Image (cartoon, coloured by chain):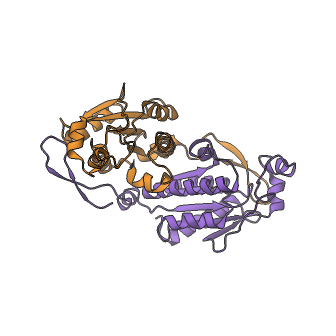
Chain colours: A orange, B purple
Amino acid sequence: MENKEVKNVSQKTIVWHKTSVSKQDRQALNGHKSCILWFTGLSGSGKSTLANALARALHEQKVRTYVLDGDNIRHGLNKDLGFSPQDRVENIRRIGEVAKLFVDAGIMTLTAFISPYRADREQVRALVEEGEFIEVYVKCPLSECEQRDPKGLYKRARAGEIPHFTGISAPYEEPENPELIIETDRVSVEEAVEQLIRYLKDRQMIP
Amino acid sequence: MENKEVKNVSQKTIVWHKTSVSKQDRQALNGHKSCILWFTGLSGSGKSTLANALARALHEQKVRTYVLDGDNIRHGLNKDLGFSPQDRVENIRRIGEVAKLFVDAGIMTLTAFISPYRADREQVRALVEEGEFIEVYVKCPLSECEQRDPKGLYKRARAGEIPHFTGISAPYEEPENPELIIETDRVSVEEAVEQLIRYLKDRQMIP
């Protein structure tokens, strides 16, 4: 935000120069840039695992991080939303707006949501500045995700118990030009984290 | 979050101990606690001015801060909401959920919204842990707010151009037991900031 001239709230109305703390001020204090690392992929592809592993590795390097995922969003901010196509759009819209606030706050923001629609992801990209949206496609064959099935969701979806389940009864639109692709059936978590950190260092997002 | 045992996403499924970064980890890295400073009061009472002045003063002391206010919420996350009683409730609910995420992220979170309903503010208080919600009543007589009228809103409200305007055509429910009261027709911004910082220091929220 720019400097603004505001009225002093005391009785003697004197001109008082307010300088709001800016994103740049916060990045300078933190010693690193802030951006959104948007992990997208099928259920069971490894988004949360990767996001949390990266956040831990960055935190050890004194980078301020935050992970937005189903755990802290679906039971809170978006607890009024379901999984219909319409609600999924609103779900991602709100997450994008919150991620933007976190970037403005100087935080390296990691999001882990299936986010199956290309248009929704592009809408988030458009919310922030050039280079602040890093789309990470967590790529894994459906068969492998279904075999992992960590929460037993695929089994329930196949049984028809979960409507609109991505990959089974709802579409997943693959990213066309993601900044990064992590094939989780081929690389380990450690290798993936290294790849992500290298990406951030190369672009001088972190020291 | 607790430690969780998760599957390695590599082909060789080995057990991999994930330790998510916790609020406590982030507070330790930042060197201060995180909480919500919830500024409430009439339009024109000085909420934004105080919140921004406090954020600036805290930032100078290397405290990580973020201000949530109409500027960054009404045009983003809550741009689908109006000013009807129902939308005001949802407005504050979402802001509370976002503020909770910021507290979890280790950020000293300042909010500047009229937030006229007592029940809504108490709902936010209930979202976070004991001591993490600091209600700051920015108290100023309606007559004084109306005289200041920095955005010309009272004039428009009196002319009937703005429906549901707090203090004119919609109620403001005063806080019953706010942690702090700042009477902005009696103290200067500087004095108020000092009072707020003293409060945080006394409770060892900041060094």
Is residue B58 visible in the rendered structure shown here?
A: yes
Residue furthest top as drawn: A176
A59 w.r.t. B137: above or below: above
Residue furthest bottom as drawn: B177
Q: Quadrant of residue B30?
A: bottom left
Give coordinates of residue A190: x percent, y percent.
Answer: 20, 43
Along the horizontal axis of the image, is A103 left or right of A59?
A: right
Q: Quadrant of residue B135?
A: bottom right
Q: Residue at x 79, y 54 (%)?
A: A13
Give coordinates of residue A181: x percent, y percent.
Answer: 29, 31
Give coordinates of residue A203: x percent, y percent.
Answer: 35, 31
Foreground pick, A147 / A5 = A147
Q: Residue at x 61, y 43 (%)?
A: B79
Along the horizontal axis of the image, is A108 left or right of B61?
A: left
Along the horizontal axis of the image, is B101 left or right of A161?
A: right
Q: Quadrant of the N terminus of chain A?
A: top right
